[in-house]
Amino acid sequence: MYFTLKFARAILRFEDAVEKWLKLRKAQGLANSTLERNRGSMDSIMYVLGKSKRLKSITTSDMDGYIERMELKGYSPNGININLRAFRTFLKWAERRNHIDKMPYVEKAKVDDTLPSYLNDSEFDEMLSHTNEFYKKVFTMYRNTGFRLMEPILGTLKNDTLVIPARVSKTRKERRILLSPEDVPVIYELQERFETWRNKVKVKKNKYFGDKISKEFRRINRLIGLTNKFHDLRHTFAVRRYLMTRDIYQVMRELGHTKVTTTQIYADFEDTVDIANEFPSIM
């Protein structure tokens, strides 16, 4: 029996192990969006290392080679590190299940120490002037709340509070966010459009609806010569809220961060730019 298990572990292919891991994560109730990101990350690594590679034979040198190849192809360090984070989680699972003897060390791609991108008042106003009334309200709501893309779409409205269930929250904990009177009707309309969309489409992957919003955001940004991503609306919220409150712990709670060190970066802008002049609407 011992030799049979040892032999099975020795011949377990990378692709087969990944399928076992993803099947378990699905059974554990992880959100479909998380599972899709995990699969995308593992597909990227399997493309470079080979699906048929024996799981037990993967080494730190293999992962160094993966980083080098992805950098040569023009992938950003942050994008590479997202894939590596999923791979480390996978390796921890493989080690606990005795599929590998010891987890190989996986080093991150080097990332420049840069501050998050945001939209100042003039950039945001110009952006709104190039879209329709619905997206004006939606983008303003995201800037006012700091929500991640799918949170107001999949959350539950209870009067003036949005309940974000644990399966949607990045921290895997339920969050309750008090909304302003201006943002409540926007979220109602957004959720109504989401339900209408779900009743029409055949492939009901929630992220596809979110993609429509982020694509419109990118379209406008390219039109006016900016390179911001949709997530920069969350960064904009954080910078603005710190300027308004000067309370990094309050901003941490509003963003749903578990550690203040994650939030501290938004207070660091004052050391690099005259941030107050970027947001005359709140000063």
Image (cartoon, rainbow, N blue to C red):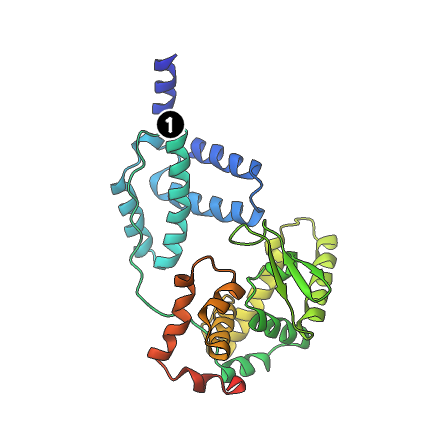
Q: Residue 89: image x %, image y %?
A: 41, 42
The residue at 67%/64% (across/down) is 161
Q: Residue 12: image x %, image y %?
A: 39, 27
Question: Splitting the image into 4 quarters, where does residue 51 fall?
Answer: top left
- Residue furthest to the left in view is 61
Question: Splitting the image into 4 quarters, where does residue 93 fall?
Answer: top left
Query: Which quadrant of the rendered structure holds the N terminus?
Result: top left
Does the rendering let one see residue 257? yes
Q: Residue 146: image x %, image y %?
A: 54, 68
Residue type highlighted by circle 1: Asn
The residue at 34%/56% (across/down) is 73
- Which residue is at the front of the view, 120 or 208? 120
The residue at 64%/67% (across/down) is 178
**Is disc 1 placed on a helix, strand or loop?**
loop
Badge 1 is on which residue?
98
- Residue furthest to the top in view is 1
Vertical position of residue 218 compared to residue 100: above or below:
below
- Which residue is at the front of the view, 30 or 227? 30
Vertical position of residue 43 compared to residue 24: above or below:
below
Does the rendering let one see residue 75? no
